[in-house]
Amino acid sequence: MNILKKILGSAAPVLATALGGPLAGSAVKFLAGKVLGSEGGTEEELAKRIEKWTPEERLALQKLDNEYNLQMLQQGINVFELEIKDRQGARDMAVEAKNLWPQIALAVIYNLGFFGVLLTLIASMGNRVQINSSIKDTLIFLLGVMASELKNVNAFWVGSSYGSKEKNDQQFAALMQQQSRG
């Protein structure tokens, strides 16, 4: 799922967000129907197909993203709102337990680990630190995995930006105007 989510990334933020939450099944079904021609496709099949697309073909992802967002909103589902509520629920649970130390410890360990691996790899580039090539490959892979989740670890504490929500609201308003004209 992470591969498909990464491919969709900034081109299709609603679909990428849905893939990371409780709407993953509906997002995969929607994409499979549009991309593969059958709603029974898997995330792996979608990732393989979309990876082969040209940059021009990938522009179609924005249209699919808007279409999925409109479909969800017509059903009364705001994908980004679900993500925010999920994060807020985790915060509320931690506050009710009156013990934030597990979350603090995990966030600090994760951030220190990420930046430790990053600094180690940077130091190895300048030959200050010698790293076996097979271990270096593993560290590069680990850094990529950790980087993909770093935003989520830190979002627990700082939340999502208001500017991002505002941008999405503007995009949706433009889409609704376009739909009413056509």
Image (spheres, helix red, strand yellow):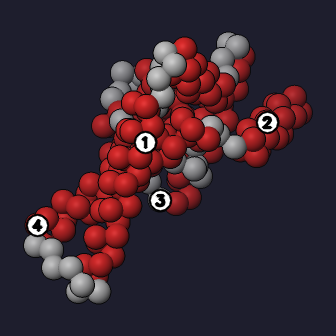
Q: Are marks 2 and 1 in contact (CB under 8 Å)?
A: no
Dot 4, crowdedness within 10 Å: few (<14), some or many (≥20)?
few
Residue 134, disc: 4
CA gap between label 3 and label 1 equals 38 Å
Q: Secondary structure at mark 2?
A: helix
Mark whose residue sits in front, 1 or 4: 1
Residue where numbered disc 3 is placed: 54
CA gap between label 3 and label 4 equals 32 Å
CA gap between label 4 and label 2 equals 46 Å
Task: Give the total of numbered labels.
Answer: 4
Q: First in sequence: mark 3 or mark 1?
A: 3
Three-letter amino acid code at the position of disc 4 = Ser
Q: Secondary structure at mark 4?
A: helix
Q: Are marks 1 and 4 in contact (CB under 8 Å)?
A: no
Residue 107, disc: 1
Residue 176 coordinates in the image, percent (x, y): 82, 31
Residue 76 coordinates in the image, percent (x, y): 70, 13
Q: First in sequence: mark 3 or mark 4?
A: 3
> On the rendered image, what quadrant is the N terminus found in?
top left
Q: Secondary structure at mark 3?
A: loop
Mark whose residue sits in front, 3 or 4: 4
Q: Secondary structure at mark 1?
A: helix
Residue 1 visible within the image: yes
Q: First in sequence: mark 3 or mark 2?
A: 3
Mark whose residue sits in front, 4 or 2: 4
Dot 1, crowdedness within 10 Å: few (<14), some or many (≥20)?
some
